[in-house]
């Protein structure tokens, strides 16, 4: 495990924070393995309000003042949505784009189908109504400079300073507040981009009021594909200022509160780093990635290697996979809002299906019940929150069915109004369909479970796996209540709802290592079919890796780590020549010493390709290329795993039993008296046959008929089908 | 001048010296050499007079909007809101800034003649609460009388406060009740409202709440306000000493049995406050 370095001298707590659409979650882990958690409503008007409130709650749970608590926090790992919100709200600056002359329309053409990027499949099919999004940089704020390089980085047409100055003035006159520079082939040779930056900084030096940020695509994303590279740089530039301001404010509040360490941000690439050394674009969708990482950690604990991670919160349902104990799937050209980028983000799919998802009748489809994608969010929230909401949601349906205890929500802090929920369901769904509110609620619940179940099935099956061999990890505030419902759709035999499931994103954040991925596009032929030879001039390969390693080492040193704490992993995006799609291959060594090393890489690629597509599909006649180098640099996490508790007997203590209540399990049987248990009073080893309700302050586990519950040695809820 | 004692109370840090929070707007008008009716029409003067009086009396918090008619009339409410916003902008560094409005049950009783019709005023009340919450008070206080204090705490009362609490939670504003004209028997049930702070004025006989009931309630919520009779400074000193002994270890502050009116003896209050500052648990 990591040793302490000069900047990392301990402290007592690590706090993970995950901002969601409805709640902000907190998980505090102690050096000795103990933990606490809490949730606060997400305060969209100023995220720092909910953030500091959560910190105060954690301090109180530890019987400390906020100042004393923060002074003992070693690390705050924060999954923030500040950047994403800025994109959605379009609150970023007015940027200008400087690109190669003749290619000014690249970002507007957008690979031909950018109008569909970021849309769900239903919207994507409604082509008559699709609107291309308003561009982040307007067409009149894009200028082309006369310059050209070829594919090898050789300069064909030099850059002229006068041309740059003229185009710069054009942008300044139109009110540019920052510049994005993205030229063709700059990922091979960044000389012209750097020259443009130099020219701008000479014209508008730092000490001038007119000084503006200049962001280069060769710095942000040195990878091939000018559209994705440019958009990645633009998105980064667009959200950078808003994020810096928001995080500075939060950092100041934390410092004023007594926190003495730098704030750490969770990245969508699966690691964490200091906020001051984070690129804004890497923070998008970091929360679900943190949850996925937590799944891998949990899987190591429980001995489950194949896990489908699910997180059902108030607004969305996230899905990710752990395969053979690892996170393997990275998003191919991930879409941020409506913009396709090329960041090496981990793949976590998201659909609009959460506890706050609104149920409505689709008149065009014969009054079929639909769920989402609209969500009631945290304000006004579901109708039963009694905050002014009028549209029935999934949570309202669950309440009407009796699954939630209106007096136990958030530990009793929030009283749910069942009458309001029933009334809304009656008015909007049951009445028009001529059914009872309970049956309408039942249909809402079954429908959302089916949607989620189908999505989970797709995710697992389309990656070539048998879903029945996967364990479902049900996280999120609403996950435990719906796990049996959607788990059945993939034939899941075992569901784990971790005891920290309602704050799993925050838990995951607290487990993540310091990590960054350094990638660069560079095309090399590793195997030539024509003479059956392997690459013999290894300098090109080794130089690229050395360059990335130098950058990574310097970066981690600035994070406060020394070289013996650093770990490096090299992955290569490879393909058969003339094919389009690439396969990611792990290289067993960072530097190549002989053609034998090259052959091993090629053999690895061939084997992996055959596993994914079939051995018949391999195409060595095309030659084997490497196109992208991806170096992951990390420092091991100091997260302490919990210790297994002693197992008690199967029969729960009588103190764990609460009053039973009537629950509507099916229209055939109507309401049936169902036992209710206090989860906090159950012990490892206890078993309960469904149907049953297990209540915690922050979530509810629903053990449906036909399922059985066991508490494992780590106090996780294990639900298995057919187990009595 | 420091708001440290109030911050300790808000953060449930039980300290030997207790915060002092009382209502004195009529007195503030007198300190500002103007009529109360004129003061509450002028937001700037309202805020300034309150702050000036708070400094004079060495108070830990300023309560604005205590008069019941403020919530019944839109214009008066708007002025109160603006005055409070100004107060927060200028004084929150030195004083706790407590916004007060008539509680939903008392408002329903006053306007509609029936506290049980509280849901008819829900939208209006929620709007007022949201408006105050946006100004970020340290506490949003609801002044309630017999409409809450002499009724059984049931679903009507719980729902009324649940809605307001949900709204205030979004803005991270704690809620409180200042209760007067109440039946002491209902004190333990007030915990069912799930509000963090409850302050007490005079009960239905004009007297103090029973100590045991206060102790019981203080163990179930985040903090209580124990009332002192400011009209009887000698008794107040004795009451304060009783409270710190009997309620030792519980999160309390001192409040007043009723609002300090325009004829309050300033010198007596100054002397009392000075003595109260020396009473510690």
Image (cartoon, coloured by chain):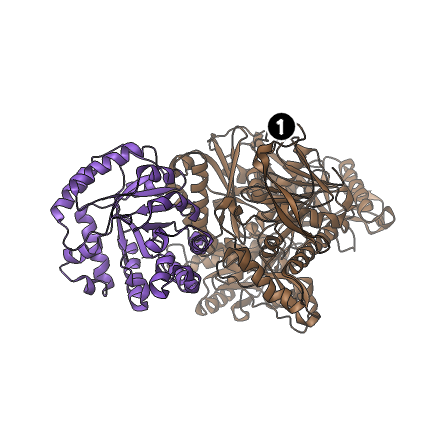
**Residue at image mark 1:** A644
Which chain does tag 1 point to? A
Q: Seen in the image, is B5 located left or right of residue A188?
A: left
Residue A611's image quarter? top right
Relative image position of residue B256 (x, y in whole percent): 24, 46
| Spot occupied by residue A594 in the image (x, y as percentages of width and height) | 75, 35
Classify mark 1: helix, strand or loop: loop
Q: Is residue B34 visible from the viewing direction of this image?
A: yes
Question: Is the residue A588 above or below the residue A466 in the image?
Answer: above
Q: From what the image shows, is residue A68 above or below residue A335? A: above
Q: Quadrant of the C terminus of chain B?
A: top left
Residue A593 point in image, percent of width and height = 72, 35
Judging depth in this view, the residue of A582 and A268 nearest the camera is: A268
Residue that sits furthest to the bottom in the current view: A128
**Left or right: A433 as drawn, with respect to A556:** right
In the foreground, A9 or B96: B96
Q: On the image, which quarter does residue B241 sit in? A: top left
Residue A348 visible in this rendered orientation of the protein: no
Q: Could you tell me which quadrant the N terminus of chain B lies in?
A: top left
Residue occupying the point 34% across, 33% down:
B249
Query: Residue pushed farthest top?
Result: A646
> Would you say A460 lies left or right of B148 here?
right
Q: Nearer the viewer, residue B72 or A374?
A: B72
Count the labels in the image: 1
Q: Colour of chain A?
A: brown
Colour of chain B, in one word, is purple
Is residue B276 positioned above or below A209 on the image?
A: above
């Amino acid at each position: 495990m990591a040793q302490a370095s000069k900047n990392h001298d301990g402290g007592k707590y690590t706090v993970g924070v995950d901002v969601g659409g409805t709640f902000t979650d907190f998980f505090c882990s102690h050096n000795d393995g103990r933990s606490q958690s809490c949730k606060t409503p997400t305060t969209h008007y100023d995220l720092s309000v909910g953030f500091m409130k959560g910190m105060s709650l954690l301090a109180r749970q530890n019987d400390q003042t906020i100042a004393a608590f923060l002074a003992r926090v070693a690390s705050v790992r924060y999954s923030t949505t500040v950047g994403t919100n800025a994109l959605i709200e379009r609150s970023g600056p007015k940027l200008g784009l400087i690109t190669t002359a003749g290619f000014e329309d690249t970002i507007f053409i957008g690979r031909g189908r950018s109008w569909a990027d970021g849309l769900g499949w239903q919207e994507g099919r409604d082509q008559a109504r699709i609107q291309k999004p308003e561009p982040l940089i307007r067409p009149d704020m894009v200028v082309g400079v006369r310059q050209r390089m070829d594919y090898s980085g050789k300069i064909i047409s030099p850059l002229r300073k006068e041309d740059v100055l003229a185009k710069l003035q054009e942008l300044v006159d139109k009110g540019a507040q920052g510049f994005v520079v993205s030229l063709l082939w700059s990922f091979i040779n960044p000389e012209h981009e750097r020259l443009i930056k130099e020219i701008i900084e000479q014209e508008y030096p730092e000490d001038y009021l007119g000084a503006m940020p200049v962001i280069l695509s060769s710095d942000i994303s040195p990878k091939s594909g000018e559209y994705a590279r440019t958009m990645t740089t633009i998105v980064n530039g667009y959200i950078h200022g808003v994020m810096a301001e928001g995080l500075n404010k939060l950092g100041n509040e934390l410092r004023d509160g007594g926190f003495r360490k730098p704030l750490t941000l969770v990245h969508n690439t699966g690691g964490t780093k200091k906020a001051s050394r984070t690129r804004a674009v890497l923070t998008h969708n970091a929360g679900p990635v943190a949850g996925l990482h937590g799944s891998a950690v949990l899987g190591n604990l429980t001995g489950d290697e194949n896990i489908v991670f699910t997180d059902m919160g108030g607004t969305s349902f996230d899905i990710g996979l752990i395969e053979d104990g690892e996170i393997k799937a990275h998003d191919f050209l991930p879409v941020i809002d409506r913009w396709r980028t090329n960041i090496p983000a981990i793949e976590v799919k998201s659909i609009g299906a959460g506890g706050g998802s609104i149920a409505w009748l689709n008149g065009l489809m014969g009054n079929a019940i639909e769920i989402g994608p609209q969500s009631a969010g945290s304000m006004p929230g579901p109708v039963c929150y009694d905050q002014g909401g009028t549209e029935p949601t999934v949570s309202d349906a669950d309440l009407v069915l009796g699954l939630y205890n209106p007096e136990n929500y958030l530990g009793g802090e929030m009283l749910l109004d069942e009458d309001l929920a029933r009334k809304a369901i009656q008015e909007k769904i049951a009445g028009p369909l001529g059914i009872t509110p309970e049956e309408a609620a039942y249909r809402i619940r079954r429908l959302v479970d089916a949607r989620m179940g189908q999505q989970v099935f797709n995710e697992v099956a389309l990656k070539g796996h048998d879903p029945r061999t996967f364990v479902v990890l049900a996280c999120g505030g609403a996950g435990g209540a719906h796990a049996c419902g959607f788990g059945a759709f993939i034939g899941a035999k075992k569901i784990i709802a971790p005891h920290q499931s309602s704050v799993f994103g925050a838990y995951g954040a607290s487990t993540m290592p310091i990590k960054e991925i350094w990638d660069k596009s560079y095309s090399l032929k590793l195997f030539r079919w024509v003479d059956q030879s392997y690459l013999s001039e290894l300098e090109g390969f080794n130089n690229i890796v050395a360059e990335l390693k130098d950058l990574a080492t310097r970066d981690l040193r600035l994070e406060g780590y020394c070289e013996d704490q650093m770990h490096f992993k090299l992955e290569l995006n490879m393909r058969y020549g003339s094919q389009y799609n690439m396969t990611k291959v792990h290289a067993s060594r960072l530097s190549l010493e002989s053609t034998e090393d090259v052959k091993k890489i090629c053999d690895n690629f061939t084997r992996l390709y055959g596993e994914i597509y079939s051995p018949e599909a391999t195409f060595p006649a095309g030659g084997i290329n490497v196109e992208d180098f991806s170096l992951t640099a990390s420092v091991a996490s100091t997260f302490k795993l919990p210790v297994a508790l002693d197992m008690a007997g199967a029969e729960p203590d009588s103190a764990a039993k609460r009053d039973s209540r009537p629950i509507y399990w099916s229209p055939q049987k109507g309401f049936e008296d169902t036992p209710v248990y206090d989860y906090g009073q159950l012990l490892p080893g206890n078993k309960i046959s469904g149907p049953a309700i297990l209540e915690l302050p922050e979530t509810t586990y629903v053990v449906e008929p036909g399922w059985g519950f066991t508490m494992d040695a780590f106090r996780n809820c294990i639900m298995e089908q057919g187990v009595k | 001048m420091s708001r440290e004692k109030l911050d300790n109370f808000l953060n449930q840090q039980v300290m030997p010296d207790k915060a002092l929070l009382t209502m004195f707007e009529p007195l503030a008008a007198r300190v500002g050499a103007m009529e109360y009716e004129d003061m509450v029409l002028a937001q700037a003067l309202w805020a300034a007079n309150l702050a000036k009086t708070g400094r004079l009396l060495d108070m830990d918090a300023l309560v604005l909007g205590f008069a019941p008619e403020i919530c019944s009339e839109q214009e008066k409410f708007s002025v109160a809101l603006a005055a409070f916003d100004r107060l927060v902008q200028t004084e929150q560094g030195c004083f706790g800034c407590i916004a007060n409005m008539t509680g939903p049950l008392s408002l329903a009783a006053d306007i509609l003649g029936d506290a049980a019709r509280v849901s008819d005023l829900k939208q209006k009340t929620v709007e007022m609460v949201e408006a105050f919450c946006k100004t970020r008070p340290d506490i949003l206080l609801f002044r309630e009388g017999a409409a809450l204090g002499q009724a059984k705490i049931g679903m009507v009362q719980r729902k009324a406060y649940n809605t307001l609490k949900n709204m205030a939670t979004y803005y991270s504003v704690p809620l409180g009740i200042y209760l007067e004209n109440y039946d002491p028997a209902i004190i333990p049930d007030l915990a069912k409202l799930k509000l963090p702070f409850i302050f007490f004025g005079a009960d239905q006989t004009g007297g103090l709440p029973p100590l045991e009931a206060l102790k019981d309630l203080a163990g179930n919520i985040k903090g209580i306000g124990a009332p002192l009779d400011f009209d009887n400074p000698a008794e107040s000193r004795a009451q304060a000493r009783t409270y710190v002994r009997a309620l030792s270890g519980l999160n309390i502050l001192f409040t007043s049995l009723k609002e300090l009116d325009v004829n309050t003896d300033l010198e007596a209050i100054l002397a009392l406050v000075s003595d109260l500052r020396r009473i510690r648990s």
